[in-house]
Amino acid sequence: MNENSSQGNAHADSSDNSLQITCFSDFVDDVTLHFQIIRFPNQIYAWIGCNSAKFGRLYAAAPTPPNNTVSVSSILGGVSDNTGSGIARRLVLKTGLNVILACNIPKNSPMLEVNAEKKLVGKLISLGYTRPKYS
């Protein structure tokens, strides 16, 4: 497992105005998964790549009032598929933050999707980016 982290400053109107970038790769089910997480004060950008550095599809997800359900939209790369949109939705539920997710995981690879999400969520937990689910 390779990992690089760096911190810099970003201007924001919140008390936590740091920007953190975390990159790592992992070999799962005979596939190399690459991850990049950029944590802004009120948002997370995450990229998951499978065997390449291609950008893939891009999704935006956010909690929506009044009961904090999650709305997901495909903003680049064609129609929404279950792979990226499902991961983006679950990341919002885990973090409570707006999420932008770029996902380059092959369709019809449910085990690869599950493993990629587990690795990403595990890293978010270790970095302290998660919070309790909405009630």
Image: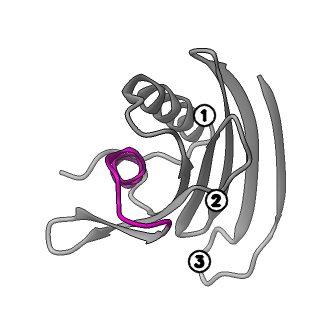
Q: Is residue 28 placed above or below 80 in the rendered structure?
A: above
Q: CA distance from mark 1 to mark 2?
A: 13 Å
Q: Is residue 60 magenta?
A: no
In the displayed structure image, the side of residue 45 where residue 54 appears, left or right: right
Residue, far top: 29
Residue type (three-letter) at the residue carrying disc 2: Arg
Q: Is residue 100 visible?
A: no
In the figure, residue 108 lies in which quadrant? Answer: top left
Q: Which quarter of the rendered picture does the N terminus lie within?
A: top right
Q: How is the image coloured?
A: one colour
Q: Name the mark nearer the viewer: 2 or 3.
A: 2
User: Sequence-wise, which precedes: disc 2 or disc 3?
Assistant: 3
- Along the viewing direction, whichever of 58 and 44 lies nearer the viewer: 58
- Along the viewing direction, whichever of 40 and 78 lies nearer the viewer: 78
Q: Is residue 31 placed above or below 33 in the rendered structure?
A: above
Q: Which residue is mark 3?
A: 14
Q: CA distance from mark 2 to mark 3?
A: 13 Å
Residue type (three-letter) at the residue carrying disc 3: Ser
Q: Which residue is mark 1?
A: 126
- Along the viewing direction, whichever of 11 and 76 lies nearer the viewer: 76
Total numbered badges shown on the rendered structure: 3
User: Sequence-wise, which precedes: disc 1 or disc 3?
Assistant: 3
Q: Which residue is mark 2?
A: 39
User: Sequence-wise, which precedes: disc 1 or disc 2?
Assistant: 2
For numbered disc 1, what is the local secondary structure?
Answer: helix
